[in-house]
Every structure is written in C-alpha cells, then in structure tokens.
Image (tube, helix red, strand yellow):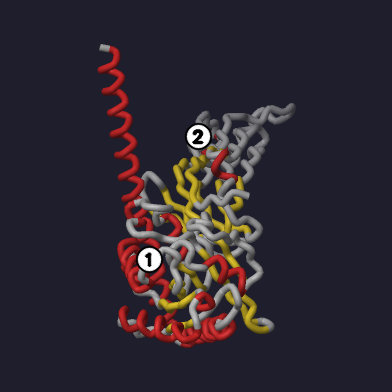
Amino acid sequence: MKFVDEATIYVEAGKGGNGVVSFRREMFAPMGGPDGGDGGDGGSVILEADNSINTLIDFRYKRKFIATSGNSGSGGNCRGKSGDDLVLKVPVGTTIVDIDTDEVLGDLTEVDQRLMVARGGFHGLGNSRFKSSVNRSPRQCTPGKAGEERNLRLELKVLADVGLLGMPNAGKSTLIRSISAAKPKVADYPFTTLVPNLGVVSVDPYRSFVVADIPGLIEGAAEGAGLGIRFLKHLVRTRLLLHVVDMAPYDGTEPAEMVRVIADELENFSPTLAERERWLVLNKLDLLDEAGREEACSALVEALGWEGPVYRISAISGEGTRALCQDIMSWIEDKAQQELDDPELAKAEQQIRERMDAEAREKIQALRQVHREDEDELDDDDDEAESIYVH
C-alpha cells in the first residue's frame, strides 16, 4: 500500500431537522391544541484513531465527507429522527489542522481516541414549544440550524521511540532490518528508502521499543533538494535520535562533514528538534581493517568535538547492535520513570513536543508557499510564451 502522510479534506456536518406547525385534531377534542414536534439533530463528523491503519491514502481519492441531516418533526409531538454521526478512521498519530484558520484542532495519539471536527446542526423547534397562557395557538416554529463546515488538513506523524537519520546509503535500513522484524528495501544506491519505515525492537521479554527509519537527507534538503525535509516531521514524536554515519563512504567524502550537513539541515528544520538527545552511530565498520577502525572513529569524534554517546557498529553483521539496543531500552525506561515521578518534567516534555510540532508545521507551510509561487511563475511564463507565439 502506498504511504501517504498528508491529505486535505472537506467535512460538513448534517443540518438539523425543521420543527413543524401542527394542531391536534381528533373527534371529541375540539380544543386539542398545538402538537408540532421538534426536528432531529444533524449528524456530526468525528475522526477516530485506528491502530489497523497506517496511511492516509483513503483520503487521497475521496476528499468530501458529509454527515446525514436530521428529519423534520411531525404532529403528535413526534420528534424527527436525528442524523447519524459520520465516523472517519485515521491512523494513530494524525494531527488535524483547520486550513482556513491554521488552528490545530487536535492530535490523535491513542487508539480509539476521538475528535469531533464538525458539530451537527441543532434541531428546529415545533409550535408546541411556543404555547403559553397568552398564546394558546402558536403558529410559529423554527428551522434546523446548518451543520459546521471545515476544510481540514490531516498530517500523519509516525509514533516511535527512536528515530534514525543520516545521509542516503548510510545503512539506516540495514540497521532497522538487523535489530527488528521490519524488512525495508536495501540496495547499493542512494535514496533506497522513499517512505518512513517502522520496526519493533524486542530487547527482552516484555521490553521493546519502536524505531523509525526516514529517507536520507542531503545538503540543501531544507530548500527541497533530494526528497526534501517533508519526512523530518516524523521525528518530532521520537524521544531519541540515532545519527547513523557511513564510516566507509563509496565517494570518499569525509564522515565528519556528512555529520555537519545533517546537523545543519536539522537546525534549519526545527531548532528544538536539533536540541533533542542524539547519539552518534558509526556504521559499516566491517569495511575497515582492524588497525584503521579505532583511528577513523577517534578522528571523527575529535573533528566534531562530540561529547555525547558514540557507538561503533556494523549493521550488516550485527556487530555492536545488541549493546546499542540494550542502552536505548534502558535510556527510554529511565526517561519514562523520571516523567512518572515528576509531573513537571512530563509537562515540559509535552511542551517541547508541541514546540517541535509548531516549528515543523511552519517550515513545511513556508516550503508549500514557495512551491505555489514557483508554479504560479511557471504558469505566467507559459501564458507569456503562448501570447508571443500567437502574435
């Protein structure tokens, strides 16, 4: 199935049913009085997080969703049937944004979590509602209210504990294949990974974490080079970043320079994300001789002035991956326990994630605007060329 992480849709809640004017007319009841019933409420549009869905592709082809309206009331004080709510299933990790106001309506991060995005119209009132001691035969009723309408953008961000980032062909896909049951495509050319991949890493019984592999970045990704930075948004929900470095690049580039390029792109995309905990994972050590391994790794760490954790691995042979996964699991458990013991720390973590979300959305919105302007400029050039040709 094609991976789609963004979609725009139009939703419209149902209209409320109209109230009616009616009077009781029965034999032996000449003063029956008003008995017009109320209409039914309109159906609402609700989004629900479903764990069995992992893409927004269903919303790529159908973009308009309208809930049913309520029925009108009838005589005998009978109320009209309310419209059924329209429940749309979306993947866990979906953020809902109102396109017209750019307001974030909600974030569905838990299974079965629901969000009402368009409320159904209120029912109209029948004339029996207006009877009083001074108005015994009311002949007024009210129509049902229209349901809410919204243009929405659905943004999917995969939920993972650990995110892998690095240059194309750094070995990220090989690493996720090595430590989990995920089987992303692996080949000896750049940009093998075109969409994010998730893998569950089982360290011990009842101890596991989720790792996300995103497409590789290159210099200028923030301006749209390569696959751009659209997939970087999937890292804002992770707790830990693993920066995978190719220690034996086929083109002879300096590993330290590749690390700096990725760090710059990360900073350009989201300064808050760039400050996230990041571990250096030096990969493909199997391609270096025993004597040169330590020298190359030490030279890289020294050139970067790196003070964080550093791991030396070979993803294809599995060398060093067990110790890496054990340390990741311990780090995640420690963080979770700290947040459990200190509510203020948990609150600060939530604020950090919201800030990363906002920065990511702002950056992607800016890139969309640039692309729209480029398309408009191309259209103007085409019109000018056509005008010249005609004349």
Does label 2 or label 1 sit earlier along the sequence?
2
Q: Nearer the viewer, mark 2 or mark 1?
A: 1
Quadrant in the picture for residue 69: top right
Name the residue: 61% across, 69% down. 177
- Which structural element holds mark 2? loop
Label 2 amino acid? Answer: Thr
**Residue 68 x, y percent position in the rendering:** 60, 38
**Residue 122 x, y percent position in the rendering:** 52, 43
Q: Is residue 91 left or right of residue 152?
A: right
Mark seen at residue 142: 2
Quadrant in the picture for residue 348: bottom left
Label 1 amino acid? Answer: Met
**Residue 227 x, y percent position in the rendering:** 43, 53
- Eyeballing the image, is 137 above or below 244? above
Q: CA distance from mark 2 to mark 1?
A: 47 Å
- Which structural element holds mark 1? helix
Quadrant for the C terminus in the image = top left
Mark seen at residue 356: 1
Q: Is residue 59 visible?
A: yes
